[in-house]
Amino acid sequence: MSGTLQALSKFVKFVGPGILVSVAYMDPGNYSTSVSGGAQFKYALLSSVFISNLFAVVLQCLCVKLGTVTGHDLAENCRRNLPKRLNLTLYFFAELAIIATDLAEVVGTAIALQILFGIPLTWGVILTVLDVLAILMFYGPDGGSMKKTRIFEIFVSLLVAGTVTCFVLELFKISVPNKLALFKGFLPSTVVFENRQALYISLGILGATVMPHSLYLGSSLVKPRLQDYDLKHYGKIEERPSLKAILYSLNYSYAELIISLFLIATFVNSAILIVAGATLYGQPEAADADLLSIYHLLVQYISPAAGLIFAWAMIFSGQSAGIICTLAGQIVSEGFLQWSLPPWVIRICTRMLAIVPCLIVTLTMGEHGISDILNFSQVVLSLILPIVSAPLLYFTANRKLMTVPKPIDERQESDENTTLVANKENFVDFTNSTWLTVVSVTIWALIGSLNCYLVISFLLGADIHF
């Protein structure tokens, strides 16, 4: 029993990064797609939510491994190991993905502020820049001190708890007479292949769930605990974490990530689809609902309280996702370009890149324009994801990067000319296994091809929900 308590006590120390990563998988950009799926196909597309999160778990575990073993996040590894021109190209797409992602956070928060407090959309968009202050206070370069890192993680976790609480309350406000049908929804369904619209929505759920910026985020958030371990045990932080720090952290980081994604991201994305399936199924106006329309539908078909709870959910998820997206912007800029600018300059610049386009559209096109720009941002994300995720697969399958030498006192006696391959006992190999490589490449190819199919169908005039 003492061993179990000791393991649990150690696990608690790792709680945080997975919660932050899960935020990227439940932003307001997911809501309209999930509502459309529930309104048209009831619970049948819950399987798409579950599969999307399985894909996310695999990719994020690769991020955890890359950041833990190399001591560098995905952006830093691109700068250090890829040709300069390719590195700059990837940076361009990564920055574009962050801007597109941030638009959903800005839109969701601005609409929620309008619903709850009557703040005009224009002012709501401007106010969303204030979330940068939270990062400025708590999260310094390279994560800052462990104490500040923990405070930041707790702050974002409270926003996540607010989002989860809102959707728990929404579930209590609906009735699901046939609970067996609900649980069957998590099993693969033929409706996805029999109905083209169901396929489109399923692909939209996939595209809205697996976000490009979360890959850079997940590979970076593991670093503070590795650095803290080496500082405590060796009194210094080397360029690469010690083998003991890696072995101390890796499995617990995996466990915390997987548990967080399934308990938080899967729950929130499933909850909104369940609420829509239970109350809006068969209502034609719900099929094309944007965020503001979803609020009005919940007020009409459930209660005014249900609409207000949804608005608060948008506040909590929009703010937490905005903070995380801004942090990802800093990670990307510093990693790819090794910027020497003060962190606050990088964060504000990243935030303004998303605020300015949204502000222009709000001033010139109003609510309809905001809905259009949100849809366009999801198209951009669908196309960019395969590009920015490809290096992740390459790095984690690269033996040169993922092989860590043992400490000198643990090495076997060997010849000076003994090579890495011939003297494996002196090294620990964290390279992806063959089966993991096959699985991750298959997921990457599947996401890429399906996203391209979705975008092409959209350009050809199909009724797509991103």
Image (spheres, grey):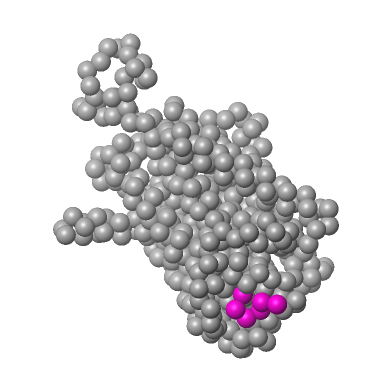
Residue found at x 34% / y 47%: 251
Residue found at x 65% / y 62%: 191
User: Taking 408 as reference, is 153 left or right?
Assistant: right
Comparing 297 with 338, the one in front is 297
Quarter of the figure with the C terminus: bottom right
**Quarter location, residue 71:** top left
User: Taking 146 as reference, is 334 left or right?
Assistant: right
Tell me, yes or no, if residue 342 can be seen here: no
Tell me, yes or no, if residue 228 can be seen here: yes
Residue segment shown in magenta: 277-282
Residue 69 is situated, as x and y percent measured from the top left of the image, at 39, 38
Comparing 217 with 25, the one in front is 25
Give the residue furthest to the left. Answer: 2
Q: In this view, does 249 lie above or below 348?
A: above
Q: Is residue 250 above or below residue 192?
A: above
User: Magenta stretch: residue 463 in it?
Assistant: no
Residue found at x 48% / y 48%: 58
User: Taking 323 as reference, is 368 left or right?
Assistant: right
**Quarter location, residue 259:** bottom left
User: Magenta stretch: residue 281 in it?
Assistant: yes
Residue 36 is situated, as x and y percent measured from the top left of the image, at 68, 69
Residue 407 is situated, as x and y percent measured from the top left of the image, at 26, 29
Residue 118 is situated, as x and y percent measured from the top left of the image, at 67, 83
Comparing 80 with 445, the one in front is 445
Q: In this view, does 353 lie above or below 238?
A: below
Quarter of the figure with the N terminus: bottom left
Residue found at x 45% / y 61%: 262
